[in-house]
Image (cartoon, rainbow, N blue to C red):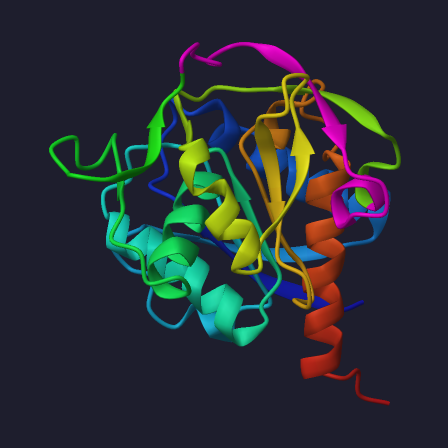
Amino acid sequence: MTTARIALVGDRSPSVQAHARIPAFLRALRGRDGLTLDAYWIPTTETDGLEEFDGVWMLPGSPYRSEAGAVNAARAAREHGVPFLGTCAGFQHTLLEYARNVLGLSVAHAENDPGAADFLLLPLACSLAGHEETVRLVPGSLAEKTVGAARSVERYFCHFGLNPDYLPALEAGGLRFTGHDESGTVRILELPGHPFFLATLFQPELAGDGSRAHPIITAFASAAVGRAALRRPRRL
């Protein structure tokens, strides 16, 4: 059985419910899905060398100790073809990385730098912390194929989202937004041409009772195991 080494990027805290569920997800992925992950917690202050992992999962828990470290994690996965999943704050910092490093925009996250002149991430008009919301998935997208349905009800614990003024530039620059709420506000992003690159504003870690991984988490794990199998072929 192939084992994938994955980086859990985030500043681990027992008060973050998504973090507390990780051990149960790892057991469920191994027992239910035959996907074995060797997971390493990587603080946002120590994100060099992530291209050596088989997968990078940027977890909730903002504000991160290091914005630069979180941005570096998303960049390493994007540039080196490492399967990537970003959730909640991971979604936000994935946007920040792409806007800065691909599009060359000088933009900030309002939570991290409230005195900045131009914001890519702004406080949500209505906080989603503790809420559930329907997400509509674009037909044929990675998100839709992964979830296996046109709609999904997801749980949130976030206060910041994308400044819609930047949506056209991000789409023109190559990002694809494949999940939206009922009003059309973006909730999922993908990067076409990458082996697996998906980020959600909602937290799939909070789905169900924690005994079984959300389909998006399972798909990420499968992509990481696939990369591991290609990099470390089984010996006969």
User: Where in the figure is residue 207, as x and y percent of width and height?
Assistant: 68, 23
Residue 147: in sight, yes or no?
Answer: yes
User: Where in the figure is residue 99, as x and y percent of width and height?
Assistant: 39, 54
**Viewer-proximal residue, 136 or 219?**
136
Tell me if 97 is positioned left or right of 192 in this view.
left
Name the quadrant containing residue 65: top left
Image: 212 above or below 217: above
Tell me if 202 is positioned left or right of 139 in this view.
left
Is 153 magenta? The answer is no
Is 139 magenta? The answer is yes
Image: 167 above or below 197: above
Tell me if 69 is positioned left or right of 228 in this view.
left
Residue 9: in sight, yes or no?
Answer: no
Residue occupying the point 43% across, 12% down: 127
Image: 131 above or below 185: above
**Viewer-proximal residue, 154 or 170?**
170
Tell me if 119 is positioned left or right of 3 in this view.
left
Residue occupying the point 64% across, 34% down: 24
Stretch of the chain drawn in magenta: 125-145
User: Where in the figure is residue 182, as x and y percent of width and height?
Assistant: 68, 17
Image: 57 above or below 156: below
